[in-house]
Amino acid sequence: MKINTAEFIISNSDVAKCPKDFLPEYAFIGRSNVGKSSLINMLTNQKKLAKTSGRPGKTQLINHFLINSNWFLVDLPGYGYAKVSKKTKSIFQEFITDYFETREQLVCAFVLIDIRHEAQTIDIEFMSYMGESEIPFCIVFTKADKISKVKIDSHVAAYKKKMFANNWAEMPHYFVTSATESTGKEELLSYIDEVNQEVFKNNSQF
């Protein structure tokens, strides 16, 4: 798939105010400072579609971008940012949870994980929530240009081991990416294209 058009549509904290269009949605979420905005800009061939910042926690709303006029890329706030107040964090958590549990247009979420670090409990817990809630998701490992191939393989293996230890039957589908080098771009967009084709073919709502 080639992204020809990417248009910002709306930002809000109320799921009821999300676009009414019944188009497939792909949500991107991860811990703050995981490189989410850079990845979105890389995928869409734009430098400033998603706002990047040196300050973690910049994304604080549900952001909808219309891609190629037939699907939505949804940029969600990061989770687990310690310097956000408990009150703010609980508000984030509430509308993120509302989005995942009520948004019928969501067909897949991409959980972003910084490949430089070993398996983090907060990421495992979040993915466990997704699994228990039966929300389809894939893992997107980011910043692959920062470490060696050997370390990448080691850290992916560590995630597999930790997930199996937490009663996962198998590792979710995953991608290894680098926004700097465009690693994984074709694979990720091809996956979205394949899912879209299945969705439009098999679901009369879309």
Image: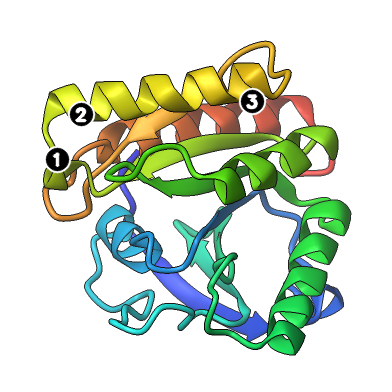
Q: Which residue is mark 2?
A: 151
Where in the figure is residue 127, as x and y percent of width and height?
65, 40
Point out the image quarter for the C terminus: top right
Callout 3 amino acid: Glu
What SS does tag 3 mark?
helix
Q: Which residue is mark 1?
A: 147
Callout 2 amino acid: Lys
Where in the figure is residue 43, as x and y percent of width and height?
31, 53
Q: Which mark is residue 70?
A: none
How many other residues sit within 10 Å of disc 3, few (<14), some (14-19) or many (≥20)?
A: few
> Disc 3 to disc 2, how far (Cα)?
35 Å
Callout 1 amino acid: Ile
Q: Residue at x 80, y 61 (%)?
A: 97
Q: Quadrant of residue 175?
A: top left
What SS does tag 1 mark?
loop
- Position above or below: 56 against 165: below
How many other residues sit within 10 Å of disc 2, few (<14), some (14-19) or many (≥20)?
A: some
Marks 1,3: beta carbons within 8 A: no
What SS does tag 2 mark?
helix
Q: Residue at x 29, y 22 (%)?
A: 154
Where in the figure is residue 76, as x and y percent of width and height?
59, 67
> Disc 2 to disc 1, how far (Cα)?
6 Å
Q: Which mark is residue 198?
A: 3
Point out the image quarter for the N terminus: top left
Q: Residue at x 55, y 34 (%)?
A: 138
